[in-house]
Amino acid sequence: MRYGVSEEPDMTKPTITYGHGFLDDCTAATLASWIETEAGVVATMTVSNDDYFVIAGTCDNVADEYVYYERDITNISTTINPKLLVRWKTSAAANGLQAKINVTYDDASSTETTLGFSTSWTTTVISLPAGKTVDKIRLIADDNPDTIAAGTFYVYFDFVLICQGIFTWPFVSGGVELEGFNNNQYLKIPSKVGNATQYLGGDDSTIRVYGDIDSTGLDAAGAPVINSGWHGRWTTHDAEAFYQILHNMNTEPWEWFTSDVASMKVTVDRVRISQAKTDMNLLSYELNLHEYRLGSAGVETNLERFGII
């Protein structure tokens, strides 16, 4: 335990992406960029809720059947951008079309990851090998087992992000807070005692993460150790990850944030970094994040929307 700070041992540390190398948000704007190749499966890929791709495929024989959609991207270095995140789900829990993703490099080698089956949205993080140059990406729906010879199944992709990294909070000395908002109008009715409530939809949620960057710990004898702990180091400067995320909003439409209270796409509304007057070595921070979405959250369950499955 840090000096003056109480922390629950089972609290999941929040994370946030930074430094986009490539992003496809799987919307109508990018659908035409993916070229189809069928192998046994008769398939289509469409966009649902203006928010995610839906691959519909029909199996009809006992051979290995699959379909993939390939996008030729602007080549990027895996040394600079070593992390790939993909959010996906399947209509079948097993025995149907499973999800896969393939990354092909300019030297013709590739990294293929079997994502598998999940009827709930799942975000998978893949570490790409260093020293490669990403050339193409394939989204794959593949029958498993191959003996599936009948039925139409669906594979969903919400986004593909290749980025510089994922910042993990070493600890949160303050808190992580979610605020949700509904638009309720309370109409005044003549002669009625009280109002008539009219629901006009819901606003995006907001998330606030705050605390100290530096901390004071205790040595073995219980005496304070000044400036021990996190120090907010990311590369060479305190809180540099926060500065970069704030600055790059003009080229990075959202970041992927995870925590115990919510996991979702977020934009950064405000970043506050403070240097304490009483201790010039102590820095504190506050991040104000805003739920990002194109389609309506009304088509999702509450668990899907807030990523608390």
Image (spheres, rainbow, N blue to C red):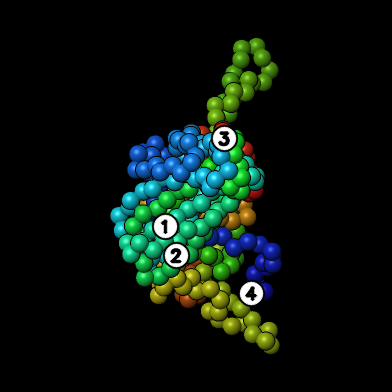
Circles 1 and 4, Cβ within 8 Å, touching? The answer is no
In the picture provided, is 194 more to the left or to the right than 290? right
Q: Residues within 10 Å of mark 2 (few under 14, many from 20)?
A: some
- Calculate the distance from the C-alpha at mark 2 to the C-alpha at mark 4: 35 Å
Q: Secondary structure at mark 3?
A: strand
**Residue 138: x percent and y percent?**
42, 50
Alpha carbon separation for disc pair 2 and 1: 9 Å
Q: Which residue is mark 3?
A: 152
The nearer-to-camera label among 1 and 3 is 3
- Residue farthest toward the left in the current orientation of the protein: 74
Mark 2, mark 4: which one is toward the viewer? Answer: 2
Query: In 3D space, how far apart are the residues under numbered discs 4 and 3 (Cα atoms)?
Result: 55 Å
Residue 103: assigned label: 1
Give the answer, above or below, for where 125 lies relative to 62.
below
Residue 162's quadrant in the figure? bottom left
Q: Earlier in the sequence, mark 2 or mark 3?
A: 2
Closer to us: 260 or 33: 33
Residue at the spot of label 2:
128
| 224 vs 190: above or below | below
Figure disc tally: 4
- Nearer-N-terminus badge (1/3): 1
Residue 210: x percent and y percent? 54, 60
Give how far apart the Cα atoms at labels 1 and 4 are. Answer: 42 Å
Q: Earlier in the sequence, mark 1 or mark 4?
A: 4
Q: State which mark lies toward you, 4 or 3.
A: 3
- Answer whether labels 2 and 1 touch (C-beta < 8 Å): yes
Residue at image coords 54%, 26%:
200
Are there few (<14), some (14-19), or many (20+) residues within 10 Å of tag 4? some
Element on which disc 4 rests: loop
Work out whether 76 lies above or below 183. Answer: below
The reply to whether dot 4 and dot 3 touch (C-beta < 8 Å) is no
